[in-house]
Amino acid sequence: MFHGRDGENRSPDVGLLTSWPEGGPKLLWKTDDIGEKTSGYSNVTIQGDRLFLSGSRNGQSLVFCFDLDGKKLWEYDNGPVWTKSYPGARSSPTIDGKFVYDFSSVGELVCLDIEKGERIWSRNILTDFEAENVTWALAESVRIDGDRLYCSPGGPKASFAALDKRTGETIWTTPSLGEKTGYASPIIFEQNGLRMIATMYAKGVFGIEAATGRLLFTFRHEQKFDINCTRPIYCDGHLFITNVTTPSGAGAVKLKLSVTDGNVSLEEVWRNRQLDNLQDGVMLLDGFLYGPSYGYKGGTFVCVDWTTGETRYENKDVGKGSLTWAEGLIYFLSEKGDVLLIRPNPEKYDVVSRFQLPEEGEGPTWAHPVVCGKRLYFRHGAFLYCYDIAR
């Protein structure tokens, strides 16, 4: 799924290049057969010898399936796509066994057969739960948990929903918070025997009981344009959330969660207005948070102490972007196509190697880098690139 098998944004790959030659690693293949120039920002997701992503063409949302040599095996038309500000697809397909799930920018949720791309079931989440789309369109990638599929309709009927992954039928819903949904994908974690789901809504973060959908907590974390896009990070009884620091923005907050008799209380631990991430690009590694800011100084690479909230350093080298991690190194992609290999180091900004993506795609490079099978994948508009990073 989006950010890997468990959503932690860490690749299990080993035997990777520890530095890159000038000009970057070897380009194995590329394709521009994933829609038009403004096709979208979906990540690739991979299972076995198949690769999936979503895109758009002629106003329609499409799901693509390729083999690992870049040959298209099938595509599926998932109805209309978002055509307003920043048109195109956002969500990354979620793979579960023999099925692929795609959530379009306008709420069409479909389950497809992985072999032929044929529809098993579909429903429109916005229509069914009487919800409105958000300002820049739905961007959540749905989460599979056992026999359940989780999604966040927002709106008057349900803030969150669990569906039967086999039929699409509703199992339970979490009552409305009276606000629209956010742009983030949910996380799942457990504390003191209570299994919880946390995700962002327009005005902050909320948590629910995974078994029943019972609302456990909310925390207001507002920004003028309701830009809550970055998933929470959970670690050792604490939850980290962040949005854009503007005169109306909140930046980053760390919260302490206490669980007693199945109930949850929150306590604010610290705030940091420098690590104000916009697009789910923060990593917690060995007690330090790493990631790009967005509003703060127009984008810097920031390191923050997880315990104290103190900023250890900031560097304006390449500005805004996204990242992933593999074999001890951070793979960073700026929104202008700069690719960096960064060593996590709380003492200094430590770049090992860098190169530039081909200037072929249109718009910012907002799709996140993906490391899988000793290959490094980038998506930029209608282009998909695959690099060999085996040592």
Image (cartoon, helix red, strand yellow):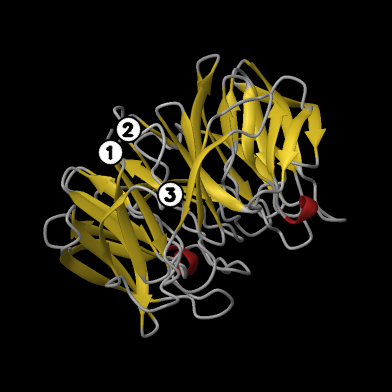
Q: Secondary structure at mark 2?
A: loop
Q: Is 234 placed above or below 38 here?
A: above
**On the image, numbered disc 3 is attached to which residue?**
369
Q: Kindly identify which numbered label has been placed on residue 374.
A: 1
Residue plotted at (25% across, 39% down): 373
Which three-letter amino acid code belongs to the residue tagged 1? Lys
- Residue that badge 2 annotates: 16
Tell me, yes or no, if residue 358 can be seen here.
Answer: yes
Query: CB of mark 2 within 8 Å of CB of mark 1?
Result: yes
Name the outermost residue toward the front.
22
Farthest residue to the bottom: give it.
58
* Image depth: mark 3 or mark 2 in front: 2
Q: CA distance from mark 3 to mark 2?
A: 15 Å
Q: Nearer the viewer, residue 82 or 73?
A: 73
Tell me what residue is drawn at x 73 percent, y 52 percent. 244
Q: Marks 3 and 1: in contact by CB < 8 Å?
A: no
Q: Residues within 10 Å of mark 1 (few under 14, many from 20)?
A: some
The kind of residue tagged 3 is Pro
Nearer-N-terminus badge (3/2): 2
As shown in the figure, which amino acid type bears the numbered disc 2?
Answer: Leu
Query: What residue lies at 37% left-to-right and 79% top-to-bottom?
Result: 36
Spatial CA distance of label 2 from label 1 is 6 Å
Q: Earlier in the sequence, mark 2 or mark 1?
A: 2
Residue 304 occupies which quadrant of the picture?
top right
Separation (CA) of disc 1 from disc 3: 13 Å
